[in-house]
Amino acid sequence: MKLTKTLLTLSLLSATSLAQAGEVEVLHWWTSGGEAKSVAVLKQLMEQEGHTWKDFAVAGGGGESAMTVLKTRAVSGNPPSAAQIKGHDIQEWAGLGFLTNLNDVAAEGHWDDIIPPMINQVMKYDGEYVAVPVNVHRVNWMWANPEVFKKAGAKVPTNLDEFFAAADKIKAAGFIPLAHGGQPWQDATVFEAVALDVLGPQDYVKAFVDLDMDALSGDKMVQVFTQFKKLHNYIDDNSPGRDWNVATSMVINGDAAMQIMGDWAKGEFTAAGKVPGQDYLCFPALGTQGEFTYNVDSFAFFELKDAENIKAQKALAKTIISPQFQEVFNLNKGSIPVRTDMDMAKFDQCAMDSMKEFKSSSTDGGLVPSMAHGMSTTSYAQGAIFDVVTNFFNDRDADPKQAAQKLAKAVKAAM
Ligand code: GAL
């Protein structure tokens, strides 16, 4: 009798734990110090709920390698539960029939009310939620080491002219003015900051969202390439191939003065125990004050077969939007929460500035999608732009006028 009872209890117990024990396999490219700390929060929360986390990390900032690996996996009929897929790519994956419908989780969590419509729209395909937004990154940031500025007697720049003046002094004092990693997506990140400054938000949108041929090849774009080229004089010879977080560490260590990079760079300063306003400075890149280049990270959810894994997958979607995750994750990641109803008390000055500018730029036309991070156009057009930008940046003799023409031609061919 006793034994039967024990067996019954045991089998009931294992039935409950089985009912919860789904597995989520999550593909991402968050492998730097700050990024890894951020994604660990999600793993921990899922494990607390009794699910198993299978990490599918593919290193490489910007996610190019991760996307290549994902394609192979999905095509072979074995997709992960969720993958870090952003912007236009979400529509593409959904259009091919790979993604699952999350409308029930979204309705329960009132996503339509707590996430800005501009972001929701990208997460939906044919009216169905197929992806979940994680955060809002601002890309047009500059990170600086105040000690280096002090030693060089240079002033923190608020526009391109001031940047060149400061960079000359910093170089003369024996420091690297601009920490940079020579990889196509990093070149494009710097290029789009210069483009936003020189073109202004309206022409930026014409060029990188509308893919307007005149905007891509016109005089103002020639000017963008001209200024972009000048920046190369302030980068060290070891930059080719360097990872973005290694470039950030050069600013942290005081070898370099500045880096132009999205606020995932702040995740590295935070992980190193550095305090903004004291150990480092954050300010809008070049002359882009009041403007905001956004990059929204998101996970797209794949159609699965196993019932327990589907349950775990839904729990993952719910957890990502939860205030608890939104707070801890974004504190580590350097971004701001995607929910508009969050208490920002624990966030630092850079995040507060980011939130303020995100809100104000969304009403005054200064809010633009990042081309370098897959927000403004298709991956095909983006790839074409990357090629032209990188080839130009790495060729000392490249001509800005020809580059602008090449840019328009390459984009046209990719359309
Ligand atoms: C971006 C991504 C960020 C950050 C960065 C560097 O594309 O949106 O979250 O991870 O790459 O890896």
Image (cartoon, grey):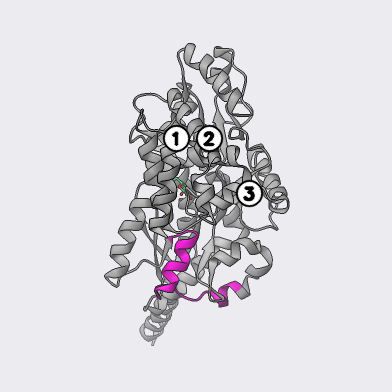
- Crowdedness near tag 3: few (<14), some (14–19) or many (≥20) residues, C-alpha within 10 Å: few
Q: Nearer the viewer, mark 3 or mark 1?
A: 1
Residues rendered magenta in the picture: 84-106
The earlier-in-sequence mark between 2 and 1 is 2
Along the viewing direction, whichever of 244 and 35 lies nearer the viewer? 244
**Looking at the image, is 286 positioned above or below residue 136?**
above
Q: Residue at x 65, y 61 (%)?
A: 116
Residue type at the position of mark 3: Gln
The answer to whether the beta carbon of the residue marked 2 is less than 8 Å from any atom of ligand 1 is no
Q: Which mark is drawn over residue 223?
A: 2
**Residue 260 seen in this snapshot:** yes
Q: Amino acid at mark 1?
A: Pro
Q: Dot 2, crowdedness within 10 Å: few (<14), some or many (≥20)? A: some
- Using the numbered discs, state the Cα–Cα distance from disc 2 to disc 1 in whole angstroms: 7 Å
Q: Compared with residue 280, is residue 324 higher up or lower down, i.e. above or below?
A: below
Residue holding disc 3: 202
- Label 3: which secondary element: helix
* Mark sitting on residue 400: 1
Q: Is mark 1 within 8 Å of ligand 1?
A: no
Of residues 163 and 29, which is closer to you in this image?
A: 163
**Near-viewer residue (257 or 338):** 257
Q: Is residue 280 left or right of residue 191?
A: right
Magenta stretch: includes residue 252 = no
Residue at x 44% of width, y 62% of height: 89
**Quadrant of the rendering where the N terminus is positioned:** bottom left
Tell which circle, 3 or 1, labels the residue nearer the N-terminal end: 3
Quadrant position of residue 163: top right
Q: Give the percent coordinates (x, y) of residue 378.
A: 45, 59
Decide: is 25 above or below 100.
Answer: above
Mark seen at residue 291: none
Tell me which amino acid carries mark 2: Gln
